[in-house]
Image (cartoon, rainbow, N blue to C red):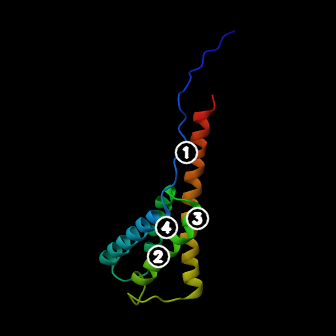
Amino acid sequence: MLEWKQVRSGTRPVPDPASTSIVWAVAAAITFALVAVFNFLDGQGDPTLDLVAISVTVAVVSTGARLTAAPGTALLCWLVLNAYATAPIGALTWEAPYDLGRIVCLLAAAATGTVLARLARARSAYHRLTP
């Protein structure tokens, strides 16, 4: 019995991730814009909503990044969050359990976004290459 299969010319590889510096710049700019909007809308208050919105944004921005960009992305976003979303504005402060929790949350969001995107791309590339 003969079985006909379509021959694909040229395989499409998994796309290369974006440059780390570009990911950091985009994440920091979006974080700064989100904090500015939230400060304008609800004033200087509890930055929990800021943290949730920034974590989601970091996960989305990290879908095009390398996993090695995750710590820097989390640190840059934490710096903006700490300096402009918590009182006193414009001053970096350190409250160990609270700030460490925020850094871990941002790092987890960045790593999750990167890993899920890379797995999805690898899976789709695998399906393109196998009959």
Residue to which mark 3 is pinned:
68
Residue to which mark 1 is pinned:
14
Residue 30 at what x, y percent from top left? 38, 67
Residue 78 at what x, y percent from top left? 49, 77
Cα gap from disc 1 to disc 3, whole angstroms: 18 Å
Q: How many marks?
A: 4
Which quadrant of the figure has residue 50?
bottom left
Cα gap from disc 2 to disc 3, whole angstroms: 26 Å
Q: Name the amino acid, label 1.
A: Val
Residue mark closest to the camera, 2 vs 4:
4
Residue 52 at what x, y percent from top left? 47, 69
**Residue 96 vertical placement versus 109 (above, below):** below
Residue to which mark 4 is pinned:
55
Query: Which class describes the residues within 10 Å of circle 4: few (<14), some (14-19), or many (20+)?
Result: many
Query: Which class describes the residues within 10 Å of circle 3: few (<14), some (14-19), or many (20+)?
Result: few
Instruction: Identify the element where label 4 is drawn.
Output: helix
Q: Earlier in the sequence, mark 1 or mark 4?
A: 1
Cα gap from disc 1 to disc 4, whole angstroms: 26 Å
Q: Name the amino acid, label 4.
A: Ser
